[in-house]
Image: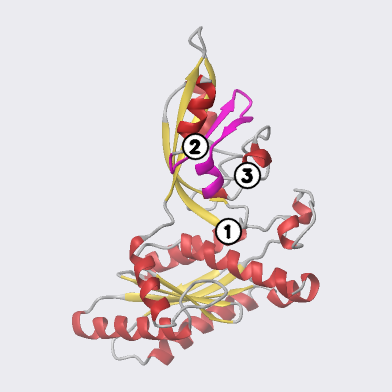
Amino acid sequence: MAEDLMTNIVDSIAEGVYIVDRDRRIGFWNKGAERITGYARAEVVGSRCSDNILRHVDGSGCELCEDGCPLLGVLEDGKVREVEVYLHHKAGHRVPVGVRGSPLWDEEGRVAGAIEIFVDHSERSGILSELERARKESLTDALTGLGNRRFLDLELEGRLAELEANGLPFGFIIADIDFFKRVNDERGHDAGDRVLKMVAATISSSLRRFDAAARWGGEEFAVVVPNADRDLLGAIAERMRSLVERSWIEPEVAAAGGAGDRTHGGRLAVTISAGGAMARKGEPVAELLARADGRLYECKRGGRNRVLVGD
């Protein structure tokens, strides 16, 4: 009875909570964890946290399950750890979360396991309010939920006006999914649509709350990055690329049915290439776009899955 009451209490909170033993095997998974990750309790309990489920990565795309796992550190020394990471959602995209790992002690004072509490940081109030306004004005892309081309045209016009009037710098990034036609040809358009939604959600999660992202057309996405210099623009573009590279759709989702397996060979994964440019005073929008687009195609010619930005 007491255990059921505790489960109900933990299930009622919004944060994700899960508990692992000394082998990092998951023994408890609350409803908040289900909501944030997309994985049901039955799919997760009994697995290890690195078994192709959450696969935490940091902002540079480093796989923490293989090197630097916060829960492993907690199990080794019993010290609380707090980190900002990106976890893998069942739908394929990356979700930014704040993580707190704490030790669980046995009666003899030894670390018997660990509990992780994680909070979804993807609900970025600034861009969400902008997109809500955009929805009311029919400025969103129906498939991905990002802004559409018209939305970003308006954003560019506003940022250029601020640059001219107040000298407020901004950059522009255009990204393209590598070999996307192959996805449609080999997996079908339903799988292609899932890839577009996965990439869109991952790009959105990689941005700051006041950056503006849109589906530029087809498999292209664009981002306006205000209050930035070339180094920051490059860092944001690289984070987008890295997180997309480390995202995937599970076989059963990619196939739109069937149980599938969780082997690497069965996943549907893609990469992106991205070009970026800093806006210049007095420059027409078309020239800014052309400079970014030119760098994107340099990346394509150079082998894809890379980023190139400049002034």
Magenta residues span 13-35
Residue 26: % across, % down? 62, 32
- Going by the picture, which residue comes out furthest to the top? 108
Residue at left 46%, top 76%?
Answer: 147
Q: Nearer the viewer, residue 240 or 282?
A: 240
Residue 276: % across, % down? 46, 75
Q: Amino acid at mark 2?
A: Asp
Residue 56: % across, % down? 55, 45
Q: For the residues labelled 1 and 2, say whether their Cβ atoms are less than 8 Å apart.
A: no
Helix, strand or loop status at disc 2 = helix
C-alpha separation, residue under disc 1 versus residue under disc 2: 24 Å
Give the number of the mark in front: 3 or 2.
Answer: 2
Q: Which mark is residue 93?
A: 1
Asked whether residue 166 is in view, the answer is yes
C-alpha separation, residue under disc 3 versus residue under disc 2: 13 Å
Reading the image, the residue beneath label 2 is 11
C-alpha separation, residue under disc 3 versus residue under disc 1: 17 Å
Of label 3 and label 1, which has the lower sequence position? 3
Helix, strand or loop status at disc 1 = loop
Of label 3 and label 2, which has the lower sequence position? 2
| Model colouring | secondary structure
Going by the image, does 209 lie left or right of 89?
A: left
Q: Amino acid at mark 1?
A: His
Of label 1 and label 2, which has the lower sequence position? 2
Q: Is residue 24 magenta?
A: yes
Residue at left 47%, top 23%?
Answer: 103
How many numbered badges does the structure rendering display? 3
When the figure is inspected, residue 103 is found, relative to residue 68, above or below; the finding is above
Asked whether residue 311 is in view, the answer is no
Give the number of the mark in front: 1 or 2.
Answer: 2
Residue 169: % across, % down? 29, 75
